[in-house]
Image: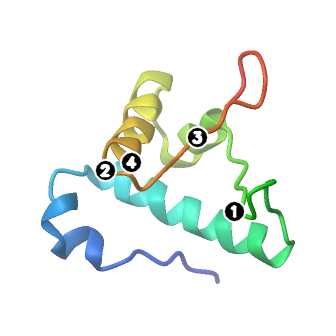
Amino acid sequence: MTYLKLPKQLFTNPQYKDLSANAKLLYALLLDRQSLSKSNNMTDDEGEIVVYFKRSEAGKLLNLSVRSTQKVFEELKNVRLLREKPQGIGKT
């Protein structure tokens, strides 16, 4: 059995008090992906770790609609826990 890490700071830091439970779970999933990317040395031109995670896949894992999935990604972006870079037309 494997587990996801969910940083306690998401619950104790006032900056994150308004994050939904789904946004916190998405963050845990992204951290899990980040550790995989890190172990595979997946970095961009600036040396930052790159995480590929399709919104459709995240929505499926969290059992969310397309609109709700977009909302939780926006929540993480609004509190600066996520940055996205376009990967091409219609891709993030």
| CB under 8 Å between discs 2 and 4 | yes
Single out the residue that lies furthest toward the top.
89
Q: Is residue 71 above or below residue 18?
A: above
Q: How is the image coloured?
A: rainbow
Q: Is residue 56 above or below residue 83?
A: above
Q: Is residue 24 above or below residue 61?
A: below
Q: CA distance from mark 3 to mark 1?
A: 12 Å
**In the structure shown, which secondary structural element does the residue marked by tag 2 occupy?**
loop
Per the image, the residue denoted by label 4 is 76
Say whether residue 21 is left or right of residue 59. Answer: left
Q: CA distance from mark 1 to mark 4?
A: 18 Å
Per the image, the residue denoted by label 2 is 79
In the rendered image, which quarter is residue 43 located in?
Answer: bottom right
Q: Position of residue 71 (x, y in %)?
A: 37, 32
Per the image, the residue denoted by label 3 is 84
* Amino acid at circle 4: Leu
* Amino acid at circle 2: Val
Q: Nearer the viewer, residue 53 or 89?
A: 89
Q: Position of residue 14 (x, y in %)?
A: 12, 65
